[in-house]
Image (cartoon, rainbow, N blue to C red):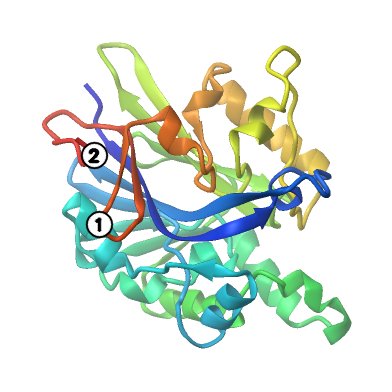
Amino acid sequence: MANYSIWVLEYAYVAKYHLSGIVYGAHNQGYRKLPYCYVLIKGEGITAMVDVGYNNQDYGKAMADAFAVEHWHDPRTVLAECGVTPEEVTDVFITHGHFDHMGGTDHFPNARFYIQERELSKWVWAMALDRKFRWLMVATDPGDVLRVVDLARQGRLVAIEGDREDVLPGIDLRAAYDTHTWGSMYVTVRNAASAGTEDRWILAGDLVYSFENLRGRNAEDPQYLPVGLGMGSQTNLMFATDQMVQEVGGDTNRVIPIHEADLPKAFPSRVTDKGLVVTEIALAEGEASKVR
């Protein structure tokens, strides 16, 4: 049986997002809902998260308004759907520094945070550039960067350099440098399915937004289609995508894109009374379903 339960938790969304932001080059091809989500991993005495949403005040709220994000709910409300409080979260993996992934650190007072050292240092570098280069900060709140630096002061930040095996039992961190951002990473959960086998899942951050990035748009002739925003390069994004797909033996259903509006069609899910979606990726032994 699995060691960890995994849920993708919607906390906000953009109702109409340009498809070209999801699939690079898909200009004038319409709009799609873009859920804003984070991931809860629970088991083995661990309550971990992949990313923490955005800071819905000050500049974080201004950025959300500019991107037409709506229906935001705080982590206490969202996590309650799985019977968890923010205070119970022990570990948080920040896949990258964009506002909707790194802004909510203050909600988790007891957690230890993990981020690629390159990701943090390159955002400081970008902040120091001449104003002509401000596009580089288009999706990043400088206040979020300062809050993460303060986590180091508090002794609650782990700066990762490259890959890290078993950062927690059965959980690996994989670097994907110069892709969506300079120091992006993804999270691999190696659940034990039965003796000698693994039930492996990849939580991809923003290296993929949609299953289309993994499979293309023609099932008979699949291809990798990178996401619309690459601070590094689209080439690096495609090779990172291939790395993830190879890691799960070619099964693209096991690479989880948290911005995928159709994720609830692929996995058990429910809509909460707040109008948010809970999607259940895996259940640990003894864990009750949160969607049935």
Q: Residues within 10 Å of mark 2 (few under 14, many from 20)?
A: some
Q: Is residue 168 left or right of residue 186?
A: left
What is the quadrant of the N terminus in the image? top left
Q: Is residue 115 above or below residue 2?
A: below
- Disc assigned to residue 211: none
Q: Where does residue 53 sit, x and y in percent of width and height?
A: 45, 64
- Of 144 and 172, the residue lying toward us: 144
Q: Secondary structure at mark 2?
A: loop
Label 2 amino acid?
Val
146 is higher (above) or lower (below) than 267: below
Residue at 60 percent across and 65 percent down: it is 98
Quadrant showing the C terminus: top left
Residue in the picture at 52% in, 22% down:
248
Q: Is residue 144 left or right of residue 198?
A: right
> Disc 2 marks which residue?
291
Q: Earlier in the sequence, mark 1 or mark 2?
A: 1
| Element type at mark 1 | loop
Q: How many marks?
A: 2
